[in-house]
Image (cartoon, helix red, strand yellow):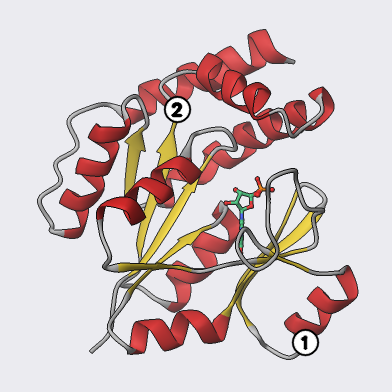
């Protein structure tokens, strides 16, 4: 028996981390893949829980040894999904969630057509900016890079199977479980929301 591979992506500050935590609170049917990264640890993060924090040399060795299911460079750092954990859990019949960015998600879709790609967007640009600012872990310059990155990433959202607007955590979680049980019906025009967010980022945040 093979579990489902679920990819959750979203702009930095879209609240996808909170959504993933909430899914785990509400169900025991999922495992979370812990990624490897070369970025430095933020306040409050823990080795082997938030990420496996590795050096650039170690990350490149993992790539060479084919230990990663996918990897990508995001802003200035490498991020990648260790292969063994994910494949073992799927073979045990567990559903595995990867919280990863777009380039990695598209690599996964290529090798696993049955994977489910979900992209989380915030309701507006202000909530994106406010979440990044409130997190207090990034400088203004880093926040600006992340907002700029959102504009580039928006190009690839069309390749996702589902786009969910994070205006209310309960609604997003309900939609998530509906997607898994094939009952989800999209009732909103996400393109309109995405275009508004992007123009607001360009006009107001840099
Ligand atoms: P952060 O630095 O905010 O923790 O993560 C930056 C971005 O990297 C986020 O969009 C996050 O989802 C993504 N990310 C985290 N782990 C992985 C991974 O293993 N592979 C890829 N491709 N992206 C990842």
Quadrant of the image containing the N terminus? bottom left
Location of residue 67 in the rendering, given as x and y in whole percent from the top left corner: 66, 86
> Element type at marker 2?
loop
Q: Tell me the residue at 55%/24% (across/down).
A: 128
Residue topped by disc 1: 64
Whether residue 146 is situated above or below residue 36 in the rendered picture: above
Residue topped by disc 2: 122
Whether residue 66 is situated above or below residue 17 in the rendered picture: below
- Front-lying residue, 50 or 205: 50
As measured in the structure, the alpha-carbon distance from the residue carrying label 1 to the one carrying label 2 is 36 Å
> Element type at marker 1?
helix
Residues packed near mark 2 inside 10 Å, few (<14), some (14 to 19) or many (20 plus):
many
Quarter of the figure with residue 66: bottom right
Quarter of the figure with residue 65: bottom right
Q: Tell me the residue at 35%/73% (across/down).
A: 113
Given the current orientation, which residue lies at the most extreme top position? 204
Whether residue 79 is situated above or below residue 194 in the rendered picture: below
Location of residue 58 in the rendering, given as x and y in whole percent from the top left corner: 84, 78
The answer to whether residue 1 is left or right of residue 126 is: left
Location of residue 82 in the rendering, given as x and y in whole percent from the top left corner: 60, 78
Q: Disc 1 or 2, which lies upstream in sequence?
A: 1
């Amino acid at each position: 028996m093979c579990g489902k591979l679920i990819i959750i992506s979203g702009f930095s500050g879209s609240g996808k981390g909170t959504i993933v935590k909430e899914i785990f609170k509400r169900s025991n049917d999922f495992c979370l893949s812990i990624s490897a990264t070369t970025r430095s640890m933020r306040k409050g993060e823990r080795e082997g829980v938030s990420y496996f924090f590795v050096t650039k040399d170690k990350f490149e060795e993992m790539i060479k040894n084919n230990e990663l299911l996918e990897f990508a460079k995001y802003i200035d750092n490498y991020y990648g999904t260790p292969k063994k954990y994910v494949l073992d859990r799927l073979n045990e019949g567990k559903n595995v969630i990867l919280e990863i960015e777009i380039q990695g998600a598209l690599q996964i879709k290529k090798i696993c057509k049955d994977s489910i790609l979900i992209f989380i967007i915030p309701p507006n640009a202000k909530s994106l900016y406010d979440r990044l600012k409130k997190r207090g872990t990034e400088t203004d310059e880093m926040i600006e890079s992340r907002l700029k990155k959102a504009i580039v990433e928006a190009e690839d959202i069309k390749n996702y199977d589902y786009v969910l607007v994070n205006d209310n955590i309960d609604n997003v979680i309900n939609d998530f479980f509906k997607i898994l049980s094939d009952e989800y019906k999209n009732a909103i025009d996400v393109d309109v929301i995405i275009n508004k967010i992007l123009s607001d980022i360009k006009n107001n945040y840099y």
